Image: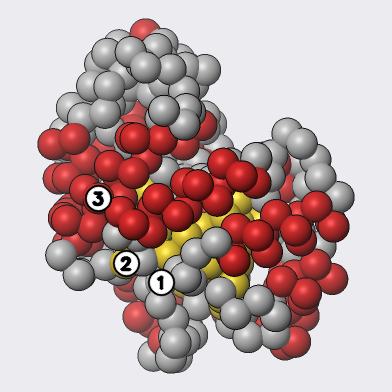
């Protein structure tokens, strides 16, 4: 349901970062893609998240993405900066710089690789939230980070005045209900297949990968849920299901989303940065089989889809490597 004090939007796109074939950011394609997403119904754009390949973006690229998104949006959508760092000091630097660059909010991912204790998570999130005046979304995705944010930790974090929401990719709906019952935290579905189930128990919106390709159906689901029209929401959810499978089940979501967007002529290259690589022939065939099942979903037109048989050529090494403070 709509939250009267929601500063993030409801249909948030976990934005891809378009690259040229050489692995450098395609800024013109980025601007066009952001505009396409907003024009299709997105009211929030999350740049530099997992889907945006944050692990292989430089810090200057991350900040420019905030600036570009803010400029293209022109107030039509909130711009949220994702990613962060598994080093607390670096995360603080990035989010402070993102605030100066014009971000409307920050999404803090659970520190990855370090596998901190819950006390470490609590300290990390609090210190980052203390370092910015922007509203904060916690990103709970143990499948990528190795560590969940436990129920007890969420209750304690909810007391921080800047921490307003959780992006949930854990899929524990009973826990979501408990946290919603006991705190004022908003929830955003972080799993494309579970958007409607999350909304049905009180989530405020979604942060989706598939929304890069089709924001309009998610806008239709959100509007139907806000109007109490579960029948319409369920119909669109079912129409979207093959597309969600195409994007989320055969290769990493970023890879599939870029493959499809390139096949639709919406970005100039499907290139991802190493260690990600494009889909192999058999993976591409599975994606295309799913796309063939899509019928009547609002805002989705695959009639001009042209698969790229060179997409599996690999990933790119950018001229400037990886995350850096320089």
Residue 294 visible somewhere in the drawing = no
In the rendering, at what x and y percent does residue 175 appear?
77, 71
Point out residue 131 in the picture as x, y percentages from the top left corner.
Answer: 55, 61
Answer whether labels 2 and 3 touch (C-beta < 8 Å): no
10 Å crowding of disc 2: few (<14), some (14-19), many (20+) = many
Can you tell which quarter of the image residue 41 is in? bottom left
**Foreground: 205 or 117?**
117
Packing grade of label 3 (10 A; few <14, some 14-19, many >=20) is some
Determine whether the residue tagged by mark 2 lies in a helix, strand or loop: strand
Q: Is residue 278 above or below residue 46?
A: above
Q: Quadrant of the C terminus?
A: top left
Instruction: Give the CA distance from mark 3 to mark 1.
Output: 17 Å
Q: Nearer the viewer, residue 191 or 34?
A: 34
Most extreme residue toward the top, as rendered? Answer: 313
199 and 182: which one is in front?
182
User: For this view, does 283 lie left or right of residue 120?
Assistant: left
User: Going from the N terminus, do you reach mark 2 or mark 1 first?
Assistant: 1
The numbered dot on residue 67 is: 3
Ranked by sequence position, the earlier of labels 3 and 1 is 1
What kind of element bears circle 1? loop
Tell me whether the residue at label 2 lies in contact with that at label 1, contact meaning CB atoms closer than 8 angstroms. yes
Tell me residue 2's x, y (percent): 44, 85
Number of other residues with Cα within 10 Å of mark 1, as a class: few under 14, some 14 to 19, many 20 or more: many
Which of the 4 quarters of the picture holds residue 308?
A: top left
Does the CB distance between marks 3 and 1 fall below 8 Å? no
Residue at the disc numbered 2: 78
Residue 92 visible in the displayed image: yes
Q: Label 1, on which residue?
A: 8
Left or right placement of residue 236 versus residue 30 in this view = right
């Amino acid at each position: 349901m709509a939250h009267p004090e929601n500063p993030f939007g409801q249909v948030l796109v976990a934005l891809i970062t378009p690259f040229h074939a050489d692995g450098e950011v395609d800024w013109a394609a980025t601007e066009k893609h952001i505009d396409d997403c907003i024009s299709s119904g997105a009211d929030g754009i999350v740049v530099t998240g997992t889907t945006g390949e944050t692990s292989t973006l430089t810090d200057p690229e991350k900040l420019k993405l905030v600036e570009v998104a803010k400029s293209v949006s022109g107030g039509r959508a909130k711009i949220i900066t994702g990613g962060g760092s598994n080093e607390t000091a670096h995360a603080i630097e990035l989010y402070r710089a993102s605030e100066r660059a014009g971000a409307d909010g920050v999404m803090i991912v659970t520190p990855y690789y370090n596998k901190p204790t819950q006390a470490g998570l609590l300290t990390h999130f609090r210190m980052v939230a203390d370092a910015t005046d922007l509203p904060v979304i916690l990103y709970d995705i143990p499948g990528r980070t190795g560590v969940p944010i436990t129920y007890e930790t969420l209750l304690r974090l909810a007391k921080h005045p800047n921490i307003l929401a959780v992006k949930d990719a854990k899929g524990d709906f009973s826990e979501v209900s408990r946290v919603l019952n006991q705190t004022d935290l908003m929830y955003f579905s972080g799993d494309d297949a579970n958007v409607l189930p999350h909304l049905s128990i009180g989530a405020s919106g979604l942060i989706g990968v598939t929304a890069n390709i089709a924001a309009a159906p998610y806008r239709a689901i959100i509007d139907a849920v806000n109007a109490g029209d579960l029948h319409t929401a369920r119909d669109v959810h079912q129409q979207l299901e093959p597309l969600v499978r195409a994007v989320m089940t055969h290769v990493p979501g970023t890879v599939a989303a870029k493959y499809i967007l390139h096949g639709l002529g919406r970005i100039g290259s499907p290139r991802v940065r190493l260690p990600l690589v494009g889909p192999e022939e058999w993976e591409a065939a599975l994606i295309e089989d799913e796309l063939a099942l899509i019928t009547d979903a609002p805002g989705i037109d695959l009639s001009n889809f042209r698969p790229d048989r060179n997409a599996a050529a690999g990933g790119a090494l950018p001229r400037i490597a990886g995350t850096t403070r320089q």
